[in-house]
Amino acid sequence: MRTLHIVNEFKAEAGNAVFTKQQAVAATLQLLEKEKLFPENTAEETAVFAAAIAKAEFRYIDATRTETDRMLDGLGVARFTTEDIVKGIEALLFDVK
């Protein structure tokens, strides 16, 4: 797999950002879509990104299912970092390959 140019740019630009669960999911999907459309992709790389988009689940960013987790989600607390999103994307791509 090539370097994740769009994800790396996101990591640099949003280094200290914190996201709500909904924002983290939206950012993940948008980053995967932009990586899928990257002009230097091979057909195989494009297929991997398409499969990752289809398989994307929030568990790649956060697998917590406690009562406190549900309360924080219900309140819309921003608590997912840029690094959480990047690691989730990397894990998802690893699983898809």
Image (cartoon, rainbow, N blue to C red):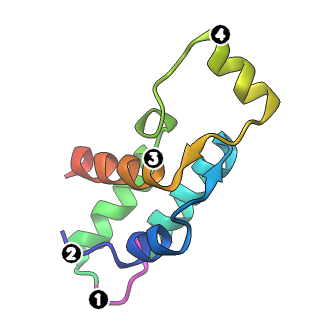
Residues drawn in magenta: 35-40
Kindly indicate whether the residue at mark 2 contacts the one at mark 3 (C-beta within 8 angstroms).
Answer: no
Q: Amino acid at mark 4?
A: Glu
Asked whether, in this view, residue 29 is left or right of residue 95, the answer is right
Closer to the observer: label 2 or label 1? 2
Mark 2 or mark 4: whose residue is earlier in sequence: 2
Residue at mark 3 to residue at mark 2: CA–CA distance: 20 Å
Q: Does residue 36 appear in the picture of this structure?
A: no
How dense is the environment of label 1, judged by Cα within 10 Å: few (below 14), some, or many (20 and up)?
few
Q: Which mark is residue 13?
A: none
Q: Position of residue 85 (x, y in %)?
A: 47, 51
How dense is the environment of label 3, judged by Cα within 10 Å: few (below 14), some, or many (20 and up)?
some
**Which image quarter is the N terminus in?**
bottom left
Q: Which residue is mark 3?
A: 84
Q: Which residue is mark 1?
A: 40
Q: Position of residue 80 (x, y in %)?
A: 57, 43
Q: Which residue is mark 2?
A: 2
Q: Residue lying furthest front in this view? A: 16
Q: Does residue 48 appear in the picture of this structure?
A: yes
Q: Quadrant of residue 4?
A: bottom left
Q: Which residue is mark 4?
A: 67
Q: Secondary structure at mark 1?
A: loop
Q: Amino acid at mark 2?
A: Arg
Residue at mark 3 to residue at mark 4: CA–CA distance: 21 Å
